[in-house]
Image: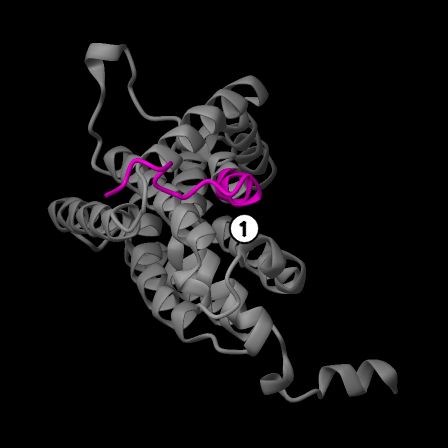
Amino acid sequence: MLLVNILLTDVSALPLRGTLLNFGTVMIGGILGLLIGDRLPERIKQAVIVAIGLMTIVIGLSGALKTENALIPLLALVIGVVIGEIVNIDGGINWLGESLKRRVDKTGSEQHFTTAFVVASLQFCVGPLTILGSIQDGLTGDFRLLAIKAILDGFSAIIFASSFGRGVLFAGVTVLIVQGGISLLAGLIKPLLISNPSLALGAQPRVIELSAVGGTVLIGLALNILGIQLTNMGLSRIKVANMLPALLIAPLLVALLNLLHIPLDLGLGG
């Protein structure tokens, strides 16, 4: 009876409605992409991928430019990427993608599985909408931000799946884990992000700097989506995953400044 009661629970009572909606749009988009993949001309796929890449830059810039002091996201990214390189997060995520590929595709015929999994997972789970939307959904049940994100991710999933294959579907699981985890832990995360109770969540300095870092990481991801290579540095792609620790470092730096009673502009402002 308990199991039946759980299964019959009103969906509106679920604390993860936004994440479930986002997961659903990614899966539906991914399946549609797989179905139409061979029918969609390559030039259209490439054109839409470019559009997604450019829009990712716009979303990234909208978050990055909100910073109140560019030194904070800069320091966060430098410290974060050093940690990421030491731990080799990028290598770990790629290893996971290759492991999933071996499990679902014994023949190894799908060459882009790992690319799809890694790029889609980062696209769906990095950025201001992910953090703010998941926390709002977990705390208040307001999933409007995640609803907007779900629509964007659904269209992206169609193109990624039609171009790269089934790895996009497994990125949907990443959405469940990352966004769902943030929403479930929102009560614990909120005190770490709020320094001024009179301000809305999105106006909190720690959230602003976290979003600035997330926006910058998105720009790096967009360069990968667009296939822009930093050949002068000997890089074929940016290891975006290795920047992820910076998302934790940014609010910690602001918290440290708050603790030391140092203004965000480091006393250099007018």
Based on the picture, tell me whether residue 266 belongs to the magenta stretch: yes
Relative placement, left or right, of 181 versus 71 is right
Q: Nearer the viewer, residue 160 or 14?
A: 14
Percent across and percent down for residue 232 are 19, 11
Res. 221 image quadrant: top left
Residue at the image point whose x is 48% and y is 30% from the top: 108
Residue at the image point whose x is 34% and y is 33% from the top: 71
Q: Residues within 10 Å of mark 1 (few under 14, many from 20)?
A: many
Q: Nearer the viewer, residue 270 or 193?
A: 270
Percent across and percent down for residue 135 are 53, 64
Q: Which region of the structure is painted magenta?
A: 253-270
Marker count (numbered): 1
Q: Quadrant of the C terminus?
A: top left
Q: Which residue is mark 1?
A: 174
Q: Nearer the viewer, residue 53 or 105?
A: 53
Specify the farthest residue to the right.
1
Which amino acid lies under the numbered mark 1 shown in the image of this protein?
A: Thr
Q: Quadrant of the N terminus?
A: bottom right
